[in-house]
Amino acid sequence: MFPLFSYLLPKTIKLSSFVVFLLIFFISITKSFANNPEVNKEANSKWLEWKKDATTTINYRPVINSDLIEIKAEVKLDSSLSGFLLFLLDTDNIPNWLDNAKESKILQSPNNNTHIFTTEFHSFWPIKSREMIIKSRQWQNDDLSIEIQIENAEGFTQKKHTILVDVVFAKWLIIPISPTEIHIEYTFIVDAKGNVPTWLVNPMTLKSTWNTLKNIKKQLPQSKWQSKSLANIKEM
């Protein structure tokens, strides 16, 4: 899930996952591939800039031995660490900012920092509904940055009308810049499965990522969660 704080959340919040946020919006449209990609950062090509403005950057690069692309999204946000994480955990609000998201829910929470959840995305021609079932684990480093590792959750079955996507690689890094500003970096490779042409998949994935970041940037500073805090998260 958006790992972490099930023990602290107000009762009105339905647990989602810190992972949902990013993994989610990019997922509905990433291309499938025949062979396992070699996730080798040194062997992969250099990052290519897709789009950039004063606060947001989207880069991508081909993944060797596959037709997938790796995407790195970076954005500066006006928020505390807790405010950002709680915003992401507000599952009722996810469809308002996560591009193409339909719904998500927690399946299991083995511990406070590990969560398993499912997220379903809307279908649109010619792409069928996708579902993501993932396990996320989060921790805070001594420098106050927060890392989140995301992987496929094993032993769960997707809904009958959906195609289960494959999370090849996904990692979040949240760095506090000041008490009210953070820098987010999300790097991921996701295989949405199904027969979707590359010429359609890659531009849609990049555009979906950009739209989601812009939605968050617009809504987050005014969110009610900016006045809340998490006892297990140290702020700058």
Image (tube, rainbow, N blue to C red):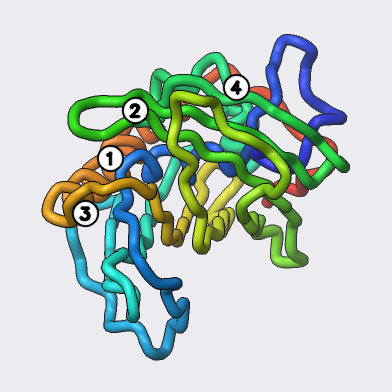
Marks 1 and 3 sit apart, C-alpha to C-alpha, by: 10 Å
Classify residue 8 by image quadrant: top right
Q: Which residue is mark 4?
A: 90
Count of numbered tags: 4
Q: Which residue was labeled with disc 1?
A: 208
Task: Say which of marks 4 and 2 sits in front.
Answer: 2
Q: Amino acid at mark 2?
A: Asn
In the rendering, which numbered label is found on residue 202? 3
Instruction: Tell me, yes or no, whether the two marked residues, 2 and 1, touch with CB atoms within 8 Å.
Output: yes
Q: Residue at x 70, y 28 (%)?
A: 106
Residue 141 at what x, y percent from top left? Answer: 74, 64
Q: Which SS class for mark 2?
A: loop
Q: Residue furthest left?
A: 199
The foreground one among 10 and 190 is: 190
User: Could you tell which of marks 2 and 3 lies nearer the N-terminus?
Assistant: 2
Query: How far apart are the two marked residues, 2 and 1, measured between alpha carbons?
Result: 8 Å
**Distance between mark 4 and mark 2 Cα atoms:** 17 Å
Q: Residues within 10 Å of mark 1 (few under 14, many from 20)?
A: many
Residue 149 is marked as: none
Q: Where residue 189 appears, x then y in whole percent?
A: 42, 61
Query: Residue 42's image quarter?
Result: bottom left
Tell me how far mark 2 sits from mark 3, CA to CA. 15 Å
- Residue at which label 2 appears: 100
Residue located at (27% from left, 73% from top):
62
The one nearer the camera, 149 or 125, is 125
The amino acid marked with disc number 4 is Asp
CA distance for labels 1 and 4 = 20 Å
Instruction: Quadrant for the N terminus, please.
Output: top right
Secondary element under disc 4, as helix, strand or loop, is loop
- Up/down of 38 relative to 78, above or below: below
